[in-house]
Image (cartoon, helix red, strand yellow):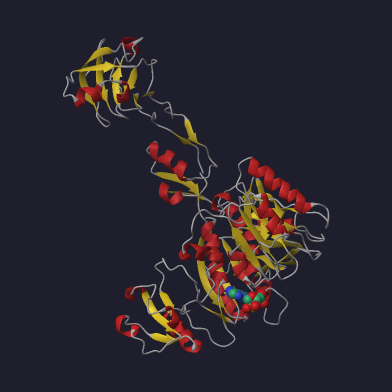
Amino acid sequence: MISVEEALDKVLSYVEVLEPERKPILDCLGQVLAEDVYSTIDIPPLDNAAMDGFALRAEDICGVGESSPVYLAVIGEVAAGSMPTKDVEPGTAIRIMTGAPLPKGADTVVQFENTDEITRKSSNGDLSQIGILRQANKGLNVRNRGEDIAKSNLVLEKGRVLRPQEIGVLASIGCSAALVIRRPTVAILATGDELIDVDQPLAPGKIHNSNTYTIAAGVSRYGGIPKILGIGRDSIQSLTEKIDEGLDADLLITSGGVSKGDYDMVKDVLVERGEIGFWTVCMKPGKPLAFGVMKKMKRGRKGQLPHLGLPGNPVSSMVTFEQFARPAILKMMGKKILKKPVVQAVIEDDVIAADERRRFIRVYVTKCRGQYHASITGNQGSGILTSMAKANGLAVIPENSNGAKAGDKVEVQMLDWEEEQGEVKTWPIVSIVGRSESGKTLLVEQLITEFKRRGYKIATLKHSHCGEIEIDQPGKDTWKFAQAGSDTVCISSPRKLAFIKKSDHDFRADEVLPIIGNEFDVVLVEGFKRSNLPKIEVHRKELGDDLLCSPEELSAIVTDGSLETPLADNYKVPILSWSDTAAIADFIEKNFVLNR
Ligand code: AMP
Ligand code: MG
């Protein structure tokens, strides 16, 4: 077995940085600049206004204030995109818009808000003059020619990765096409007699080919151009034919057929067609990995085609893609940073078993008060792609370790970087633990009192090991917490959850539903007669025939009296017998039970 690092070094030693190409800047996103770019112009090209206001001479408004304005003659106006036709002379100002060239003679722009223009306009006053209400230092609100980019300066150096901002800089200097390292074409071949394409119906013993799609999406994500070769069958002939179609690519990625099974032919093709490097890499998932170079026997560019044979299991295939194909693609694109971003995170779950291989565990990383936390996203089987879909990182558990325990710090390779993370955990939560009789409960009570004194709103959560839980019973911990002032008191056990939330708000039934959860088929409410929920009223003969609800509010009436009750005349709804529970249930089932 070779290490992940050795395998990666080997892969990288076979791929080269590709040639440059010149193309429209918008097609260059994520590509590496292959030449130094100099500007042939100044940006901005002229001194101009950074605010809407009046262009003037700072010395003309020296010492002015709201109670001692200076009045200047307004001799013109200049908008963005046009040139001033007059110069600013002493005692004059030119009205100017943001981005408009600064008139000769002016050295400062005073924004409208610091003039009396609004007052003049609202009182139909004289606009041939302007009162300046605030003094300004020379140069205020003026953007100087060349202050961003000076003509003939180096703007972007060779090797820069073009992001939206670099593409914007190129546009600003009038550069519509850039010389960049070209994107690698990556031929992708899935292998296996069991595979069926996504748009075909499944047949017995068959599965959809997902690897091609995961790999192609990964190729695009990292800047390459996927060339899909489809599905090769488990025969040397089929694989050879398919591979021939991909010989003009820069990299060939196959998936499957590299383990020790009888039909794992990819390695046989490699032996026949190229130089093989066939390894077992010290990692899990992803132990079997083939790497070699295919000799090009057909059309296509000179040289050899590097071939990465990924394992077939969907997660193994993706994890090895991230470890080996991604850096190879990035290297070909001229990128210098090939490693995935990593963070140190506290792992929230045990990764128990010892293993001689390095493990990549699918985790979801969140950040809480500056600390990253990683929780395992579920079944780690190498065929379970959904736990990969739930993950935003791969926790790396070193080879020959005993695994990790919840609370240990581990390195996590981020599949998505921080900006793409989900919600950040910010629960203000702390757990008071100790042996039985250590005084935990009393401490919690005292803390509640103390925090109440400090004006906080508090919830307490108690765990009970026995399934039966009591809440609000004198003497019980939850009762003590409530007495001490806790606003909400929860208790959970392996079988139940209960809580009492102090509230000045009289909850409506529909407000309670989001709190209790939405996994129910039907919610039976008792009371809430003023709500606008559908209602069934219970009628008791000895209490008289006056009902609580009006006819239009009711869906049915349940009575212990005769079903022929005179009520039936006023209420045109079903009348059901109090003793016929089944009939009442049928009615509710038909009308209200959620039809899943
Ligand atoms: P192999 O390495 O060819 O023995 O494949 C290992 C496992 O991965 C088998 O269960 C295959 O069915 C599965 N597998 C191989 N290729 C694909 C693919 N393209 N899409 C989904 N599963 C695959
Ligand atoms: Mg196979």
Left or right, residue 511 beside residue 387? left
Q: Position of residue 141 (x, y in %)?
A: 37, 23
Ligand 1 located in image quadrant: bottom right
Q: Quadrant of the N terminus?
A: bottom right
At x 61%, y 50%, the residue is 426
Q: Position of residue 492 (x, y in %)?
A: 68, 64
At x 58%, y 80%, the residue is 233
Q: How many marks?
A: 0
Q: Nearer the viewer, residue 433 or 374?
A: 433
The answer to whether one can see residue 84 in this image is no
At x 60%, y 79%, the residue is 192
Q: Position of residue 251 (x, y in %)?
A: 58, 62
Q: Position of residue 347 (x, y in %)?
A: 71, 56
Q: Nearer the viewer, residue 147 or 366?
A: 366
Residue 311 higher or lower than 371, as above or below: below
Q: Which picture quadrant has residue 553?
A: bottom left
The answer to whether one can see residue 234 in this image is yes
